[in-house]
């Protein structure tokens, strides 16, 4: 296992208890319908699976919460977002919690194609599960925040779809982006111990820091280049002292403002409330952020954004 994979696997395991085991007791009396490990792309069945969550007995078509986990592009698993999935389902959403191919085995742009396939799975199964495709929200944390934002861009950009060799007519109306990396090249060029950024860029794209300009998929290295007026209304969580993604949310919010896209945000200021702090659930900043995020999601579902 590489250093970078070890680091992000360790983070998931370290925070599994506060993220999931303790948090899930809140939902012990909720009757969920949970289906796990549904294959959405037969070309890579081991990597391309998803879980669905909803509350049993709900009437009418449900809004969709399409969640993409993080893990530095090289690690992570939907397993570690179990409580978060229940949290969103308890608000009335049909949750689609997605796994995708991890780098370096699945380099850019393979995960992007897989996530479009997962989105199209939602469309193909809308009648089966009673889904409202006009109320779809995409969400993700860290590298998953990048994939969520980029997927939103791909859905509104036919040129990107053509180059990727994918097609979808589905659109997201809302986004919840948690400490995402929205300009991969800029972020990974930063100086990290043990050249972590360079290693992650090599895993993600197979290139070095000085090879970005000639990279075949350079356009997939930055969400910022593709944001347009059709980008979904967004809630951004970010940490002012983020050790991985400092300044990334600020750059995205600037573009959203320029394009006239509605967004709301919350940021932590403490050093301990750092990258993806909201997944901890316990700190004052995490609780405040998650309350604001829930309010945003409920207003989206009610058509009141």
Image (cartoon, helix red, strand yellow):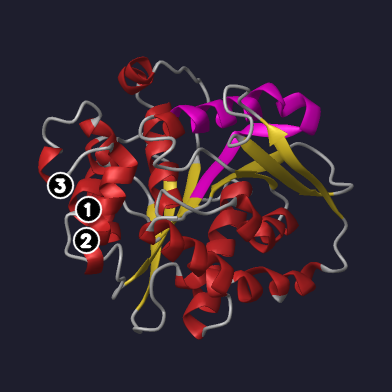
Give the mark nearer the N terminus: 2 vs 3.
2
Mark 3 in CB contact with mark 1 (< 8 angstroms): yes
Mark 2 in CB contact with mark 1 (< 8 angstroms): yes
Element marked by disc 1: helix
Q: Mark 2 highlights which residue? A: 195
Q: Mark 3 highlights which residue? A: 209
Residue 13 to residue 100: above or below: below
- Out of 83 and 48, give the one closest to the viewer: 48
Q: Position of residue 305 (x, y in %)?
A: 50, 50
Rounded to the nearest angstrom, the CA distance separating label 3 from label 1 is 6 Å
Task: Say which residue appears at 58% left-offset and 75% top-offset.
Answer: 281
How crowded is the residue under tag 3: few (<14 C-alpha within 10 Å), some, or many (20+)?
some
Q: Is residue 181 left or right of residue 68?
A: left
Quarter-of-image position of residue 91: bottom right
- Out of 135 and 140, give the one closest to the viewer: 140
The single residue placed furthest to the front in the displayed view is: 1
Element marked by disc 3: helix
Q: Position of residue 285 (x, y in %)?
A: 47, 80
Q: Is residue 2 visible?
A: yes
Which residues make up the magenta segment? Answer: 113-139
Task: Say which residue appears at 17% left-offset and 43% top-offset.
Answer: 208
Q: Position of residue 106 (x, y in %)?
A: 43, 35
How crowded is the residue under tag 1: few (<14 C-alpha within 10 Å), some, or many (20+)?
many
Task: Say which residue appears at 46% left-offset and 27% top-offset.
Answer: 113
Foreground: disc 2 or disc 3? 2
Quarter-of-image position of residue 194: bottom left
Q: Mark 1 highlights which residue? A: 198
**Residue 125 part of the magenta-drawn span:** yes
Task: Say which residue appears at 26% left-offset and 50% top-offset.
Answer: 257
């Amino acid at each position: 296992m590489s250093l970078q994979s070890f680091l992000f696997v360790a983070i998931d395991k370290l925070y599994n208890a506060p993220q999931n085991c303790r948090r899930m007791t809140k939902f012990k009396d909720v009757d969920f319908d949970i289906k796990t490990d549904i294959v959405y792309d037969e070309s890579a069945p081991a990597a391309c699976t998803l879980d669905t969550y909803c509350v049993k007995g709900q009437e009418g078509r449900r809004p969709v919460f399409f969640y993409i986990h993080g893990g530095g592009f090289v690690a992570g698993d939907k397993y570690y977002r179990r409580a978060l999935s229940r949290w969103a389902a308890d608000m009335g959403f049909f949750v689609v919690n997605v796994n995708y191919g991890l780098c370096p085995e699945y380099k850019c742009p393979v995960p992007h194609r897989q996530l479009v396939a997962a989105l199209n799975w939602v469309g193909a199964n809308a009648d089966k599960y009673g889904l409202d495709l006009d109320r779809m929200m995409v969400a993700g944390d860290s590298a998953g925040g990048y994939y969520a934002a980029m997927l939103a861009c791909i859905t509104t950009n036919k040129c990107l779809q053509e180059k990727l060799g994918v097609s979808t007519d589905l659109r997201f109306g809302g986004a919840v982006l948690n400490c995402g990396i929205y300009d991969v090249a800029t972020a990974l060029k930063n100086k990290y111990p043990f050249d972590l950024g360079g290693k992650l860029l090599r895993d993600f794209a197979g290139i070095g820091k000085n090879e970005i300009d000639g990279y075949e998929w350079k356009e997939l290295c930055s969400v910022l280049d593709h944001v347009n007026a059709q980008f979904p209304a967004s809630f951004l969580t970010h940490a002012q002292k983020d050790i991985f993604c400092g300044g990334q949310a600020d750059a995205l919010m600037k573009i959203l403002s320029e394009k006239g896209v509605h967004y709301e945000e919350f940021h932590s200021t403490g050093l301990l409330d750092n990258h993806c702090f909201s997944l901890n659930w316990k700190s004052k900043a995490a609780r405040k952020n998650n309350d604001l995020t829930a309010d945003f999601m409920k207003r989206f579902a009610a058509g009141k954004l």
